Image (cartoon, rainbow, N blue to C red):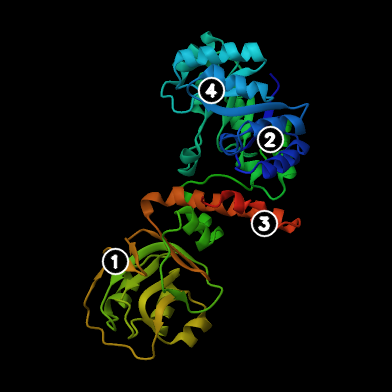
């Protein structure tokens, strides 16, 4: 079949979904999907409204049905869905009943192989049952870990004689890989719906499909090698939101506005006023590191101008001090990022108590060597190195969604209206 571009409206508010859908269709989207979050939020009214607004387009209801196949397919089809999605992990009887209901009520059945280990085997089984389409789906959570590959897509497309849909992390840069791996239906969510200009985003992907060439995408998932750039792009509030409002240090502030600090932590444990270990850490720090100092929230300086110059010459990214810093005017002039709890004129003595490279607590957050530390005007956040790729991608996701909301506000709305806050207040 001719390649199809399907826009996945995975939003919670129907009004926003419809508007984004209109813009996507204007940009060339062929099929319009009521995503699972939208269906869970708005019920079959979401399907009915999309059918009303897009009478000539194929409407997909991503029900993710796993039981009572006949009942759910009937509901979706009667509401206007042309295609209904059922999970491949369902019992064969559920899929059989879904196929029967689809034939009775005029809907086609797409089986999503999400969560299936042997996708080729399951694809052959559901093809014999009589489904119309098969979907290879990389979940959001897998995408956040930087996993977007088309190996399964290629194997399944060669094993069955059904049109194959692909979903999860598709954009204008990797859509050609999806097509060459056997995809017939390109399902795109965030790379269209999170853009400020949805129409242009849909057009870019459509152009890549038609002209068979890679087109640069603003929205994509990243791997570990990209983390410095990712954390440089997002704000500390974006990162904290991505960590469920966690990770932010308390009481730690920048010496001046305008700092942007990103790097891996080199940790230092010391006593109030003892600046020996903090200064010795400069020798051990690598280019791009952030020295993070636990000085017990002290009020006697453990850091100053000369230490800052040493860091600047080694191209260390910055310093975070749960304690005191001095020589603030000179540090500000040299534009070296320092974040601290306190400011003091007096320094202590270099007694050498403490350790370098151990787990510490700074601003109320545990920090280990190698954790990512990001600072800006809003403060400092810590990202555990084990979860850094996922958090980086989730922080980008937060920023991208906010970009779209900002665009809707600029068109004349306000935040409470865009988000329908009253509707979502806890009862």
Residue 353 seen: yes
> Dots 4 and 3: beta carbons under 8 Å?
no
| Marks 1 and 2, the one that precedes in the sequence | 2
| Marks 4 and 1, the one that precedes in the sequence | 4
Can you say whether 232 is above or below 149 in the image? below
Point out the frontmost of discs 1 and 2.
Answer: 1
Identify the residue under disc 1.
360
Q: Position of residue 352 (x, y in %)?
A: 22, 79
The quadrant of the image that shows the N terminus is: top right
| Marks 4 and 3, the one that precedes in the sequence | 4
For the residues labelled 3 and 1, the Cα–Cα distance comes to 38 Å
Point out the frontmost of discs 4 and 1.
Answer: 4
Farthest residue to the front: give it. Answer: 427
Q: Which mark is residue 213?
A: 2
Identify the residue under disc 3.
406
| Marks 2 and 4, the one that precedes in the sequence | 4
Nearest the viewer among 344 and 64 is 64
Identify the residue under disc 4.
86
Point out the frontmost of discs 2 and 3.
Answer: 3
Is 282 positioned to the left or the right of 215 in the image?
left
| Marks 3 and 1, the one that precedes in the sequence | 1
For the residues labelled 2 and 3, the Cα–Cα distance comes to 31 Å
Please identify the quarter of the rendering in which residue 406 is found.
Answer: bottom right
Secondary structure beneath label 4: strand
For the residues labelled 4 and 3, the Cα–Cα distance comes to 35 Å
Point out the frontmost of discs 2 and 4.
Answer: 4
Can you say whether 73 is above or below 251 in the image? above
């Amino acid at each position: 079949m001719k390649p199809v571009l399907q826009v996945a409206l995975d939003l919670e508010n129907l009004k926003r979904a419809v508007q984004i859908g209109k813009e996507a269709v204007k940009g060339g989207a062929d099929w319009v999907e009521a995503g699972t979050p939208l269906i869970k939020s708005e019920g079959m009214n979401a399907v009915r409204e999309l059918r009303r607004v897009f009478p000539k387009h194929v409407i997909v209801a991503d029900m993710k049905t796993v039981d009572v196949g006949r009942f759910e397919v009937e509901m979706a089809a009667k509401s206007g869905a042309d295609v209904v999605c059922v999970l491949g992990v369902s019992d064969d009887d559920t899929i059989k009943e879904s196929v029967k209901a689809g034939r009775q009520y005029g809907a086609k059945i797409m089986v999503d192989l999400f969560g299936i280990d042997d996708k080729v085997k399951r694809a052959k089984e559901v093809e014999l049952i009589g489904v119309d389409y098969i979907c290879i789906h990389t979940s959001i959570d897998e995408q956040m870990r930087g996993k977007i590959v088309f190996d399964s897509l290629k194997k399944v497309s060669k094993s069955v004689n059904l049109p194959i849909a692909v979903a999860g992390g598709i954009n204008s840069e990797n859509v050609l890989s999806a097509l060459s791996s056997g995809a017939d239906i390109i399902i795109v969510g965030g790379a269209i719906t999170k853009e400020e200009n949805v129409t242009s985003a849909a057009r870019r992907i459509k152009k890549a499909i038609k002209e068979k060439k890679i087109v640069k995408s603003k929205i994509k998932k990243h791997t570990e090698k990209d983390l410095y750039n990712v954390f440089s792009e997002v704000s500390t509030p974006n990162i904290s939101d991505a960590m469920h409002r966690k990770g932010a240090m308390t009481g730690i502030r920048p010496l001046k506005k305008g700092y942007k600090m990103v790097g891996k932590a080199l940790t230092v444990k010391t006593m109030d006023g003892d600046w020996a270990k903090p200064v010795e850490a400069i020798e051990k720090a690598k280019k791009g590191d952030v020295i993070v100092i636990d000085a017990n929230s002290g009020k006697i300086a453990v850091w100053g101008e000369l230490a800052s110059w040493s860091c600047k010459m080694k191209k260390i990214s910055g310093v975070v001090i749960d304690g005191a810093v001095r020589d603030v005017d000179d540090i500000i002039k040299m534009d070296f990022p320092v974040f601290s709890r306190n400011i003091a004129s007096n320094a202590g003595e270099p007694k050498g108590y403490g350790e370098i490279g151990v787990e510490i607590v700074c601003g109320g957050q545990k920090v280990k060597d190698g954790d990512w530390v990001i600072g800006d005007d809003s403060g400092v956040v810590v990202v555990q190195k084990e979860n850094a790729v996922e958090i980086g991608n989730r922080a980008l996701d937060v920023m991208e969604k906010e970009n779209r909301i900002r665009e809707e506000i600029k068109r004349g709305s306000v935040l409470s209206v865009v988000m329908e806050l009253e509707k979502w207040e806890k009862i």
